[in-house]
């Protein structure tokens, strides 16, 4: 893949989708210009307190994972969940009457959906540990990788199949009570570590968690949250021009809320995650469902089950080439402080044919 590769239509590989629950089962049809087989589905209730749910086609779409909790995954159908996927959508089920995770009557939901490879997995032997099981889409830079170590107490590398160095990775022990870990690299100092996705904790640089990946393998340490004889799932993304971007920025609150830091992504974002690096604070997410116009101030918190909501402290402008902070809130824009971010595109800033996108 050439370095100037651009995805002209991000909706082929990632979409945000809003829907209203009906209290039973419901077929959700995605939009976009072409079909998107849902291989990673992340759902959050917009209207009420409920768990985030994350499901994927690699381990089986009816297996529920909860990014805001350290609980083990579950196949308990009494909770709200995704039942199945189709060539351009998925089916949600309320579960027991009144369950609010996926399809409670009259409540609003945001679904964040990635296409990988239609659920088709293969074995990868690139690492020094056991073979990994991967579902990969090199064009979009997305891999779902599963691993399990032969023994506890040693770090390992495992193949991811992307052919490009990852920019963001989320690791979870499937059958242990452990934190979720989001790998991150400080591109200025090359410091590697991880954030606990289900807590507010600051950046953890312990080598027992994640270490530096390569274009063929990801590297995990000895912490049971990321490696051991249990089963682990890894959601891995490599940066792709016009589609995804990962990195860090520094706050400039001394410039005032109206002139916060601008972060260039090379596209108009549909989804943004921001986490304060060196101090405890929430994992904030904006999507273009709840923020169809600027200023965007409706956020979700990955580390909490609370419903999303608007707050003037969380203002961001979504622009044709990135996003700009419109706040002096320390969790997002404290002067001189570092923040990690991940973003996925609604539309590239400029397509491969040179066609520009429009701002809001």
Image (tube, rainbow, N blue to C red):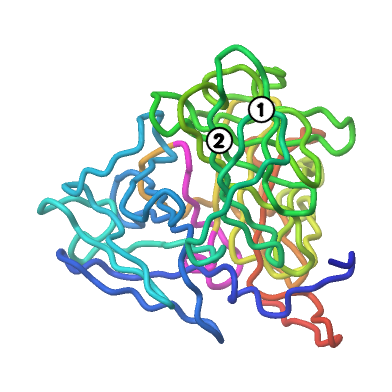
Disc marking residue 73: none
Question: In this rendering, is residue 158 above or below 52?
Answer: above
Q: Residue at x 21, y 66 (%)?
A: 106
User: Which quarter of the rendered picture does the C terminus lie within?
Assistant: bottom right
Marks 2/1: CA distance?
Answer: 10 Å
Q: Is residue 55 left or right of residue 349?
A: left
Q: Which residue is mark 1?
A: 220
Which of 93 and 303 lies nearest the eye of the viewer? Answer: 93
Q: Position of residue 104 (x, y in %)?
A: 20, 59
Q: Position of residue 205 (x, y in %)?
A: 72, 21
Q: Is residue 277 left or right of residue 110?
A: right
Q: Which residue is mark 2?
A: 147
Which of 224 and 186 lies nearest the eye of the viewer? Answer: 224
What is the magenta segment's predominant secondary structure? Answer: loop
For discs 2 and 1, the disc positioned in front in the rendered view: 2
Q: Residue at x 74, y 50 (%)?
A: 246
Magenta stretch encompasses residue 220: no
Magenta stretch in the rendered image: 287-303
Which of 98 and 173 lies nearest the eye of the viewer? Answer: 173
Q: Position of residue 57 (x, y in %)?
A: 43, 57
Q: Position of residue 142 (x, y in %)?
A: 64, 57
């Amino acid at each position: 893949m050439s370095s100037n590769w651009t995805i002209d239509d991000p909706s082929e590989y990632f979409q945000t989708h809003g829907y209203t629950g009906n209290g039973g089962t419901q077929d959700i049809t995605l939009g976009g210009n072409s079909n998107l087989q849902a291989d990673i589905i992340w759902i959050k209730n917009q209207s009420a307190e409920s768990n985030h749910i994350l499901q994927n086609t690699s381990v089986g779409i009816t297996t529920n994972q909860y990014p805001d909790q350290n609980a083990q995954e579950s196949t308990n159908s009494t909770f709200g969940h995704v039942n199945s996927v189709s060539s351009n959508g998925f089916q949600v089920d309320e579960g027991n009457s009144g369950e609010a995770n996926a399809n409670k009557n009259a409540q609003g939901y945001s679904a964040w959906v990635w296409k990988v490879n239609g659920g088709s997995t293969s074995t990868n032997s690139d690492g020094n540990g056991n073979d990994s099981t991967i579902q990969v889409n090199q064009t979009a830079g997305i891999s779902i990788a599963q691993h399990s170590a032969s023994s506890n107490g040693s770090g390992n590398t495992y193949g991811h199949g992307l052919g490009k160095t990852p920019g963001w990775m989320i690791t979870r022990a499937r059958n242990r009570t452990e934190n979720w870990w989001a790998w991150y690299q400080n591109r200025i100092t090359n410091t590697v570590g991880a954030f606990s996705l289900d807590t507010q904790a600051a950046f953890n640089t312990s080598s027992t968690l994640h270490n530096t990946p390569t274009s063929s393998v990801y590297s995990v340490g000895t912490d049971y949250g990321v490696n051991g004889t249990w089963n682990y799932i890894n959601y891995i993304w490599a940066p792709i021009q016009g589609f995804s971007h990962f990195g860090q920025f520094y706050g400039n609150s001394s410039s005032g809320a109206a002139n916060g830091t601008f972060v260039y992504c090379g596209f108009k974002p549909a989804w943004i995650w921001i986490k304060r690096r060196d101090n405890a604070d929430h994992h904030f997410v904006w999507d273009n469902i709840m923020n169809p116009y600027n200023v965007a101030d409706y956020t979700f918190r990955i580390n909490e089950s609370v419903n999303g909501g608007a707050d003037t402290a969380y203002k961001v402008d979504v622009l044709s080439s990135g996003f700009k902070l419109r706040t002096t809130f320390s969790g997002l824009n404290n002067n001189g402080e570092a923040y990690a971010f991940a973003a996925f595109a609604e539309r590239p800033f400029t397509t491969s044919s040179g066609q520009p996108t429009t701002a809001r």
